[in-house]
Image (cartoon, rainbow, N blue to C red):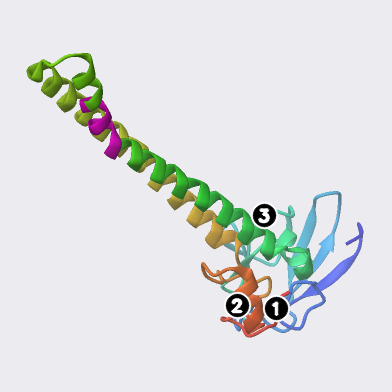
């Protein structure tokens, strides 16, 4: 969009991003680019209005990234202007899967070390000397330490996985209706061809 250019935004608007939300009028608002990163949004007397920072506005200067509500549809100028085909969902899925596998491998390692450490300790103390009291004490010590360390590592893993899943739910979304398309590989989703929420073909 060039500076000075105008677009009508809506369900039947001129913006590249398709909007299917019924709370958005066919011609909801006018968007004008006024500067490098400044835009003016103007309500075209829509049913449900335009909201910026919780206030219904008639005309307002915003930035590309400013959160914007058209009716109850949350968006931004950046999102409205982005070409649906430019989002590479295959890449988003692959990044997620790679990161998830990394954490799964990490967990496997931690659990293996946790399980093996008492056995290794026992063998080591047996080999060093035959004092069963010392062996027993070292064994209990190793078990407690590895249990505490293991729990800490797994708690960290769970936190990172929760973050990863939250990020995925925001990024792995239909370019048309912005709804999360599920923890399913994109190659499988592509076989069904259509978004499970809005029915528009996936890119
Ligand atoms: Zn959709």
Residue drawn 61% across the image and 67% down it: 173
Which residue lies at the image location 63% right of the left edge and 58% below the top edge?
94
Q: Which residue is mark 2?
A: 48
Q: Residue at x 57, y 71 (%)?
A: 179
Q: Secondary structure at mark 3?
A: loop
Front residue of 51/128: it is 128
Q: Is residue 68 above or below residue 16?
A: above
User: Which residue lies under the disc numbered 1?
Assistant: 45
Q: Nearer the viewer, mark 1 or mark 2?
A: 2
Please tell me how crowded label 2 is: few (under 14), some (14-19), or many (20+) other residues with Cα within 10 Å.
some
Query: Would residue 93 appear left or right of 125 to someone viewing this image?
Result: right
Please give the range of residues in magenta.
Answer: 115-122
Chief secondary structure of the magenta span?
helix
Q: Earlier in the sequence, mark 3 or mark 2?
A: 2
Residue 66: mark: 3
**How many badges with numbers are in the image?**
3
In the drawing, does residue 144 fall left or right of residue 33? left
Residue labelled 1 has its Cβ within 8 Å of some atom of ligand 1: no
Out of 180 and 28, give the one closest to the viewer: 180
User: Which of these two is toward me, 22 or 154?
Assistant: 154
- List x then y, in percent, for residue 80: 74, 66
Of helix, strand and loop, which one carries label 2?
Answer: loop
Q: Compare residues 189 and 194 and report the one nearer the observer.
A: 189
Instruction: Determine whether 117 is above or below 108 in the image.
Output: above
């Amino acid at each position: 969009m060039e500076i000075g250019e105008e677009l009508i935004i809506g369900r039947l608007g001129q913006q590249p991003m398709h909007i299917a939300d019924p709370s958005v009028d066919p011609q909801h608002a006018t968007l004008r680019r006024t500067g490098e990163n400044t835009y003016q949004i103007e309500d075209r007397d829509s049913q449900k209005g335009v909201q910026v920072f919780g206030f219904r506005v008639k005309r307002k200067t915003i930035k590309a990234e400013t959160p914007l509500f058209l009716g109850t549809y949350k968006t931004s100028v950046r999102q409205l202007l982005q070409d649906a085909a430019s989002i590479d969902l295959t890449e988003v899925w692959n990044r997620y899967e790679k990161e998830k596998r990394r954490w799964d491998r990490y967990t496997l390692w931690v659990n293996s070390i946790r399980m093996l450490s008492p056995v290794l300790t026992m063998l080591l103390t047996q080999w060093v000397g035959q004092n069963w009291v010392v062996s027993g004490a070292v064994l209990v010590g190793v078990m407690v330490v590895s249990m505490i360390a293991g729990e800490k590592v797994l708690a960290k893993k769970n936190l990172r996985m929760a973050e990863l899943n939250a990020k995925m739910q925001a990024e792995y979304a239909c370019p048309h209706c912005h709804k999360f398309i599920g923890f399913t590989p994109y190659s499988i989703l592509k076989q069904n061809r259509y978004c499970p929420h809005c029915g528009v073909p996936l890119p």
